[in-house]
Image (cartoon, rainbow, N blue to C red):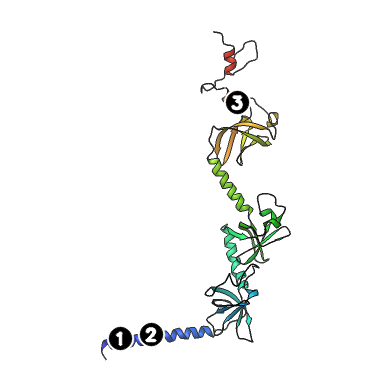
Amino acid sequence: MNQQENLETEEIVEEKTLSMDDFKDELNQSFKKIKEGDLLTGTVIGISDTEVTVDLNYYTEGIIPLAELSNDPRFSIKADIQVGDTVTAVVLREDLRTGNIVLSKKNAADILAWDTLKEAMEAKKRYTVKVASSVNGGVITYIEGIRAFIPASQLSTQYVEDVEAYVGQTLTVVIITVDEDNQKLVLSAREVLREEESLAKTNKISHLQIGLVTSGVIEKIAPYGAFVNIGDGLSGLVHISQICGRRIKSPNEVVKEGQEVTVKIIDVKDGKVSLSMKAVEEDAEIVDDVEEVSFEYSSGEEAGTGLGSLLANLKL
């Protein structure tokens, strides 16, 4: 036998050895002891109206009854699972009548989902969910096959009285509570809405023009100034020193809530808008873009510093 023939013989022996080893592994796999509670992964090979058949690479097949497929009541055995899908399920028992292994996909989802949900909460991952039903104080939906609760207070940035109106709606949510021990999963749509509103507000503020004069309504008065709603969801602060040209101890001496005022945007910084009422008054006294300089004089009448008053008493 020449060298070439020896090489070919060795390759054939090696192929046979590999084939036997592979077969041995598959054989050992098919006869390994499966016990209740084991987590198994297999391939869907059959679907009927009442159950799903799974190839477990075992001497017998796995069966997932319809009731063990999902916790989500909207789950459809015809639409939500397909032949060829890879599924992970928990061993419930062996069916002594058929010899098949009875599995639960929803139990496996519970085991695997909680870790995923904890990671999603830490990452502030957003989910798009459809509200399945309403309960006292909120609504129910499902994430990763787990039943989740959205309190009424977390449905919107506004007060929600009729939670039933949200059934069937699609919401974008984040997870705010994950409690595996008590099987408690709480979501919030309000957090997402607040974040989006904040981003929109920041964008609007960044486009405000310093020096712009506009009208607004005083919505709140504080000891240090007045907050003015200037429209488009934006508010700014008129500091007490910017309310009028004289020194005052409280904004209430000059303005009141609900009052319409004219303000000038004097600064935009760190998402905050600074306004001035006093600057509008000063602007009204500016003539030909000449910056006003304080004048003090006496004419036997009330003293004044306005350019108009000065010109009125000027003799040519």
| Residue 121 sits in quarter | bottom right
Earlier-in-chain disc, 2 versus 1 = 1
In-image side of 2 versus 306 (left or right):
left
Q: Which mark is residue 7?
A: 1
- Secondary structure of residue under mark 3: helix
**Residue 177 on image: x %, y %:** 64, 59
Q: Which mark is residue 272?
A: none
Earlier-in-chain disc, 1 versus 3 = 1
Q: Give the residue type that dot 3 points to.
A: Glu
Crowd band around label 2 with a 10 angstrom C-alpha radius: few (<14), some (14–19), many (20+) = few
- Residue 270 seen in the figure: no
Judging by the rendered image, the residue that carries numbered circle 2 is: 15
Q: Is residue 309 above or below residue 152?
A: above
- Secondary structure of residue under mark 1: helix
Q: Give the residue type that dot 1 points to.
A: Leu
- Secondary structure of residue under mark 2: helix
Q: Residue furthest top?
A: 316
Q: Is residue 202 above or below residue 48?
A: above
Residue at 57 percent of width and 18 percent of height: 307
